Image (cartoon, coloured by chain):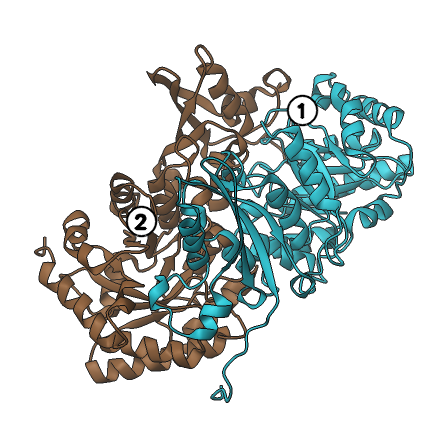
Chain colours: A brown, B cyan
């Protein structure tokens, strides 16, 4: 701890956030300035006296548009070194306190190379998952072990049947934690063994993705356990553990398996138009920055109310060029039925993982049979290899 | 890993969640049933065949009221063993996937002793913080080190002045992370030393609370560092790291200092009426279950738009009887000015910590002087000891 000789020089590089504001006439500039202060110095404008802090640290209004009455689009830039390679601090600068304000929504992010360089992103990405599974040229198949309340033996039997039926990725339902009725370690060991047994019979390489979401440092411990036990991937819920935990898992050498993120408890940010954060940022850009190899989200036309446009925006954000980050594979889910498969393949193209859960149970108790129907439907309607 | 002999028997004890729903005529029961399924089995009703799971695991609609046209209040109970002592799994069962649905808000929780027994809650609580500070009979004073962009030397000088002026708890602004301009460890060491120096002069026992919020397991590492370095408390942002991380810190013997939770990035749940979670649950009950000794929230009449009623509800939830959990001290904040102090003391009573930040900078550059003015105002208007 030595006294600093020279004053710190802030980096000139900045990242941008576009906020959509509900504003009264003439109020737009004051509202934008309030956000620029709130997200940085948290002080009234007039008491920030340091010139370097005024110039570099306070958010800078880059553009302010009034697309329609009562609405403003403010692009505010922030110095890269207010956040750096720390994803949760980046999220904090983007929307920490302002999330508590009504009538403001994060519409998009503009992230420069200087910032993106600090984010390795997905370790496997879409192609890495394909390699693990040995699957090219068609979308991937995913389902969930459910319902909550089943024993590890019953869940493992279900995993076996799904793998036998040709499902690529068999994940825990996100409500499976470490409950007494299905303790984490026993569940992981049984399900891994069951999927391996099925792979031995089919010659395929299906993988099991246990839910490693847990309190504090236990998430990392569970992810490492999953890897040691032979799980091919892991499921984690950033809404409950924070995106920083996903970031840590994605960089952890003792984890080193693909990560699927689950959308639960992030709904607060997307359930109300005009507030929160755009769907493609919450379920596309942020998981990808965190290093998610696959991002699960609530598809249009299922049990949730995400629009088709929002969902395609998520898929776009997961795959579009973003520094050197690998693409994250989008995983539409949430009450999808087999009848939707053709339309979904047309909408998302080949680089998608379709997650059908409940509908595989509707076809009767032979889950391997139902899984095969899903697989055949998907293969029959797969788009041509681009 | 042994084969289970008997089927698992679900506990009979249940916890309750009251959801407020925006509903079309005649739709209330179907919506409530959909939540009961979504938050547990995530399957269509007709394919859940196991009688024990139907009876115990699927959420049970206890009451369904229609208080006004277009609105329903559904009380749904869940088996305690779907969540147990795992706070983030409890949050997951309460609102994980349903958070993505529009028109549904968590209004209140009913938590039985069987569940609360798994939650030690605040280690210090309101009285424990008072003991550390040596302060009884008056509300507590809190301020923040700001703005982001200052060096550790400048922040420590500010901490010294605030402690000299009699502020009880001097916390990092929540935007201070581990940036190059104010690295975490150097900042903590300097600020701890500065506050100790002031305490030596005043004879008081002011404490410094660094922001330990970080990615993944680094939060725990920073909290332990803060304790070793002599910090009297720590600040953590559950919206960024998850409530489970707070729970872990609160139970960690190598941390063992009071925890203040900060409200940032939980705004998604409170910024829209009719969606999200009631303020008193987000900023009262959940931090207390996690073990927060003090809960900071955006006060009415400041920069944010929480209502007076919502804020008093938070203070109530922080202190009302809840199993054996100690009370969490409420910390209203967010643009409060000194002129509000008398009214705030009347509203919150003696067991409150008032956080005034920016307004202490408005009174000119002598921060110790400004702090003394805050302190005198508070002492002059303190409610009589109950």
Indicate left or right for B301 with A68 as reference.
right
In this view, the residue in front, B97 or B334, is B97
**Residue at the front extreme of this rendering:** B26
Residue A49 visible from this viewpoint: yes
Q: Residues within 10 Å of mark 1 (few under 14, many from 20)?
A: many
| Quarter the N terminus of chain A occupies | top right
Indicate left or right for A60 with A333 as reference.
right
Q: Residues within 10 Å of mark 2 (few under 14, many from 20)?
A: many
**Numbered label tally:** 2
Which numbered marker is on residue B358? 1
In this view, the residue in front, B196 or B129, is B129
| Tags 2 and 1 both on a single chain | no
Instruction: Provide the residue designation for mark 2.
Output: A325
Q: What's the distance in space between the residues labelled 2 and 1, CA to CA?
A: 39 Å
Residue B361 lies, with reference to residue A195, above or below; the image says above
- Where residue A315 appears, x then y in whole percent? 26, 47
> Which image quadrant for residue A280?
top left
- Where residue A87 appears, x then y in whole percent? 46, 45
- Where residue A348 appears, x then y in whole percent? 19, 49
Residue sitting at x 45%, y 35%: A80
Residue B8 lies, with reference to residue A384, above or below; the image says below
């Amino acid at each position: 701890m030595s006294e600093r000789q020279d004053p710190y020089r802030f980096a000139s590089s900045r990242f941008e956030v576009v906020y959509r504001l509900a504003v009264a006439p003439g109020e737009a500039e004051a509202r934008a300035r309030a956000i620029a202060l709130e997200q940085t110095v948290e002080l009234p404008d007039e008491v920030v006296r340091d010139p370097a802090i005024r110039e570099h640290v306070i958010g800078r209004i880059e553009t302010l548009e009034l697309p329609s009455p009562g609405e403003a689009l403010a692009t505010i830039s922030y110095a890269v070194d207010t956040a750096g390679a720390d994803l949760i601090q980046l999220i904090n600068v983007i929307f920490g306190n302002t999330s508590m304000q009504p009538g403001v929504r994060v519409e998009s992010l503009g992230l420069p190379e200087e910032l993106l360089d600090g984010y390795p992103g997905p370790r496997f990405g879409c192609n890495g998952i394909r390699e693990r599974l040995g699957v090219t040229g068609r979308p991937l198949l995913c389902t969930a072990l459910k319902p909550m309340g089943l024993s590890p033996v019953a869940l493992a039997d279900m995993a076996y049947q799904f793998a036998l039926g040709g499902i690529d990725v068999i994940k825990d339902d996100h409500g499976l934690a470490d409950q007494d009725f299905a303790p984490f370690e026993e569940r992981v060991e049984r399900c891994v063994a069951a999927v391996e047994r099925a792979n031995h019979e089919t010659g395929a390489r299906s993988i099991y993705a246990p839910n490693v979401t847990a309190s504090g440092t236990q998430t990392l411990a569970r992810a490492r356990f999953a890897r040691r036990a032979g799980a091919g991937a892991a499921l984690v819920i950033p809404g409950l553990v924070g995106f920083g935990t996903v970031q840590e898992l994605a960089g952890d050498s003792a984890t080193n398996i693909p990560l699927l993120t689950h959308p639960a408890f992030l709904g607060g940010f997307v359930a109300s138009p005009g507030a929160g954060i755009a769907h493609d940022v919450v379920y596309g850009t942020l998981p990808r920055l965190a290093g998610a190899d696959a991002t699960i989200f609530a598809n249009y036309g299922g049990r949730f109310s995400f629009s088709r446009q929002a969902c395609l925006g998520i898929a776009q954000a997961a795959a579009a060029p973003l520094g050197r980050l690998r693409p994250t594979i989008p995983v539409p889910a949430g009450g999808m039925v087999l009848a939707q498969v053709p339309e979904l393949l047309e909408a998302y193209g080949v680089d998608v993982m379709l997650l059908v859960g409940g509908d595989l149970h509707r076809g009767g108790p032979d889950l391997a049979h139902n899984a095969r129907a899903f697989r055949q439907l998907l293969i029959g309607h797969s788009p041509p290899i681009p």
